[in-house]
Image (cartoon, grey):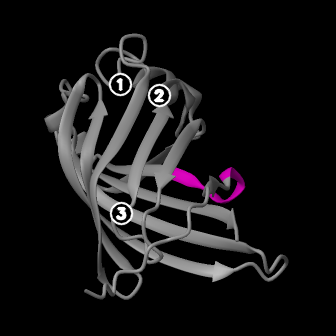
């Protein structure tokens, strides 16, 4: 029996942190989106196929590294009414599926955990894989991950009404990985 599935050569994909940002946004006072990111994070990939289908993703962000470009707000977000960073220092995501749905588009499903709560989430991914123009033995994979979660699902900022902070939190992550052939 002949198989048409492509199997990737075993290789290590390394996160290029200089070209990676894990971000989020939330609407403030019904008028503008406040954006933030995490400075310290890690992402591990297990890539079983050339087209990345079935890739397993483990992500961890250090909640203490939150950055919204406002130190007072960052310190407040680390408190018990938001991330409760002392009790829950990490935000994690573990994929359950990564499926190619169209050219350069994937559906990502997994468990997101923060503030002591785990919820299953669906995310959209756009990806691109190219040979490095500087090093033909290097391959670069870039992904933009987008989605939305509800802060109420994670007991996050419960004392703030949706007039002050939207229940919807937008996730936008841009990441690049490299590997040597």
N-term-proximal mark, 3 vs 2:
2
Residue annotated with mark 3: 146
Q: Residue furthest top?
A: 86
Asked if 162 appears above or below 32 in the picture, the reply is: above
What crowding class fits label 3: few (fewer than 14 Cα within 10 Å), some (14-19), or many (20 or more)? some
Q: Classify mark 3: helix, strand or loop.
A: strand
Residue 19 x/y as whole percent = 66, 60
What crowding class fits label 2: few (fewer than 14 Cα within 10 Å), some (14-19), or many (20 or more)? many
Residue annotated with mark 2: 63
N-term-proximal mark, 3 vs 1:
1
Residue 16 as seen in the image, left or right of residue 172 = right
Q: Which mark is residue 105?
A: none
> Gap in Å between the C-alphas at discs 1 and 2?
7 Å
Asked if 35 appears above or below 152 in the picture, the reply is: below
Residue 161 x/y as whole percent = 16, 34
Q: Which residues are magenta?
A: 17-22
* Residue drawn at x 37%, y 69% as measured from the top left: 125
Using the rendered image of the protein, determine whether residue 142 is visible from the camera's viewpoint. Answer: yes
Q: Are marks 1 and 2 in contact (CB under 8 Å)?
A: yes
> Gap in Å between the C-alphas at discs 3 and 2?
19 Å
Residue 99 x/y as whole percent = 28, 70
Using the rendered image of the protein, determine whether residue 168 is visible from the camera's viewpoint. Answer: no
Quadrant occupied by the N terminus: bottom left
Q: Classify mark 2: helix, strand or loop.
A: helix
Task: Identify which residue, 47 or 9, lies in the foreground.
Answer: 9
Q: Classify mark 1: helix, strand or loop.
A: loop
Residue annotated with mark 1: 83
* Residue drawn at x 64%, y 54% as measured from the top left: 14
Task: Identify which residue, 39 or 175, lies in the foreground.
Answer: 175
């Amino acid at each position: 029996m002949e198989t048409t599935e492509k199997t990737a050569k075993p290789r290590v994909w390394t996160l290029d942190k200089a070209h990676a940002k894990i971000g989020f946004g939330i609407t403030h006072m019904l008028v503008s989106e406040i954006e933030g990111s995490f400075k310290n994070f890690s992402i591990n990939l297990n890539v079983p196929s050339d087209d990345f289908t079935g890739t397993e993703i483990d992500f961890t962000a250090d909640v203490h590294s939150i950055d919204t470009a406002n130190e007072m707000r960052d310190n407040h977000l680390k408190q018990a009414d938001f991330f409760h960073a002392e009790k829950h220092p990490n935000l994690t995501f573990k994929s359950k599926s990564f499926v190619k749905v169209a050219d350069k588009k994937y559906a990502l499903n997994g468990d997101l955990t923060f503030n002591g709560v785990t919820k299953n989430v669906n995310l959209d991914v756009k990806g691109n894989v190219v040979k490095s123009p500087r090093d033909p033995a290097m391959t670069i994979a870039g992904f933009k991950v987008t989605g939305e979660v509800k802060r109420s699902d994670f007991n996050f900022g419960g004392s703030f009404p949706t007039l002050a902070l939207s229940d919807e939190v937008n996730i936008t992550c841009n990441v690049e990985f490299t590997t040597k052939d």
